[in-house]
Amino acid sequence: MSSLDGDVSQNGSLKSVDAHRASAEIEDLDFLRSLDKPPRLLNMERQRSCDERSLNELFGVPLLSPRPSSRAESNFRLIDHLDGLYSPGRRSGFNTPRSQYGFETHPAVAEAWDALRRSLVFFRGQPVGTIAALDNTGEQLNYDQVFVRDFVPSALAFLMNGEPEIVKNFILKTLRLQSWEKKIDRFHLGEGVMPASFKVLHDPVRNSETLMADFGESAIGRVAPVDSGFWWIFLLRAYTKSTGDTSLAEMPECQKGMRLILSLCLSEGFDTFPTLLCADGCCMIDRRMGVYGYPIEIQALFFMALRCALLLLKQDEEGKEFVERITKRLHALSFHMRSYYWIDLKQLNDIYRYKTEEYSHTAVNKFNVIPDSLPEWIFDFMPVHGGYFIGNVSPAKMDFRWFCMGNCIAILSSLATPEQSTAIMDLIESRWEELVGEMPLKVIYPAIESHEWRIVTGCDPKNTRWSYHNGGSWPVLLWLLTAACIKTGRPQIARRAIELAETRLVKDNWPEYYDGKLGRFVGKQARKFQTWSIAGYLVAKMLLEDPSHLGMVALEEDKQMKPPMRRSHSWTF
């Protein structure tokens, strides 16, 4: 990369970069102005959403601040109203040459919808999910199952297209599975654990169908999915936001399901941190990749799920008890994450100068991180303007790798402040070649290799350097990036990434992931017609077409959770 930290275009011309930035800012402004206008068919006078009412009742504060003090806050102010509106499910015009909002429909959209519908799974005549992949070229393994995390972009696509019934069916079926007795060998799992996946079994003799769930007992490494419960709460809130129907979330069964999930993650223990202690393989990165401890993806999802649950729980006797516990945890978690996981140039320099073996409350190096443990790559990777949440923080360990999902969810959940969210976008733009390359989007950067790869992954033949979860590129992340871009008022970043993906995805038959430093090669073990690659693309397209859909997946900033910032103030936004 250039020593000018990404501020120079490919031909090295500063002048062309200035022109590009000026053009981008004009485009941003036009886009943000469009967000301030109600989209067609959207009833602006509907009753305030449960989100807005709950936050006001809980904290007694207005959702909008009196005056933005920075470019970042200004961008956020313009989209603040989106979370207070229903995100109405309606057809996005994918069968027409041109959508109702004037966007040209790319040929890939119709093909994507056709593939998504072919992936539907039915149980007793009703659609209940989508299988992981339609690839019939090799052994199926578990790709013919419905995964909770994999179904999320599919569910959002159907909700945005005005087809909520499949999402409702999925929520209720997985809720029923949660109530099963969960036993691995002779050990019983927690009552609130949601399944990683399920499969519909057909009995042709009895002409019957049953569901078979996997709670981790069949997974590689036998690790229970920590993220499934969080994604389930997220989807319940997205369904409620999309339809305006609160009856599903208010069902006693759904209320109990949420409380069971929350009981697991809010239980008291020996922890001195508000973050969740997790094993390797408990989330999207489902193999050993050194994310054990307190990984950013789980902490951001945890934060998102807590905020969604806060809006969905009924204010009865049981609900109020959890609301109080959630509120306390959110304040502690936001302070911890914003203070200790955040890194920019100033914070990096502070760590570089840390003293060790400090004791007492006056310690600056609270986790006793040895400065010599700083990886060489981070000094060139960190731009002048930008920052991100690092992968992990625990005693004597800071994982400085970039994790895309955790940072995007931090933006959408407002775990990241407006200033931090803008800095994350600045980082993506400055490090476009490393994080996006020729196929969006790096799940982790950088890859680990050589001796470190042998130690960290246990010589995992699938997670070789720049492949799979070890620096591979995953098209499914497009929807998260696009939502984060819209929330931060930077739609041109998402548009550029989507245009890149459209040059390859259909031609390559919608692969699961791509390999190589630039994402140039279809993954060596990647499945074709991967459903969440298909659905992630559709959700990204629909978010750009109708930004009011952002309300399904994003939450407004809670003004009560603003601890002192530990970041550079050497520039303004």
Image: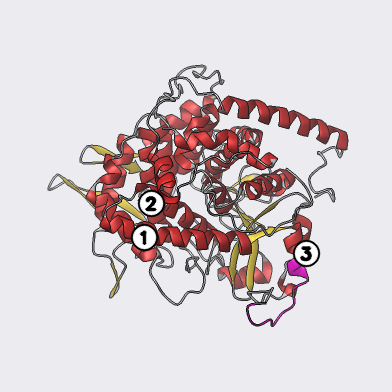
Report whether 318 appears left or right of 467. left
| Nearer-the-camera pick, 529 or 419 | 419
Numbered disc 3: secondary structure: helix
Q: Give amino acid for label 2.
A: Ala
Tell me residue 63's x, y (percent). 51, 41
Q: CA distance from mark 2 to mark 1?
A: 9 Å
Q: Which residues are magenta?
A: 350-362
Residue designated by label 2: 309
Q: Can the viewer see residue 88?
A: yes
Q: CA distance from mark 3 to mark 1?
A: 38 Å
Do callouts 3 and 2 mark residues in contact (Cβ within 8 Å)? no
Tell me residue 336's x, y (percent). 57, 64
Q: Give amino acid for label 1.
A: Leu
Do callouts 2 and 1 mark residues in contact (Cβ within 8 Å)? yes
Asked if residue 160 is among those painted magenta in the image, a careful observer would answer no
Q: Which mark is residue 262?
A: 1
Point out the tag, 3 or 2, that comes first from the N-terminus: 2
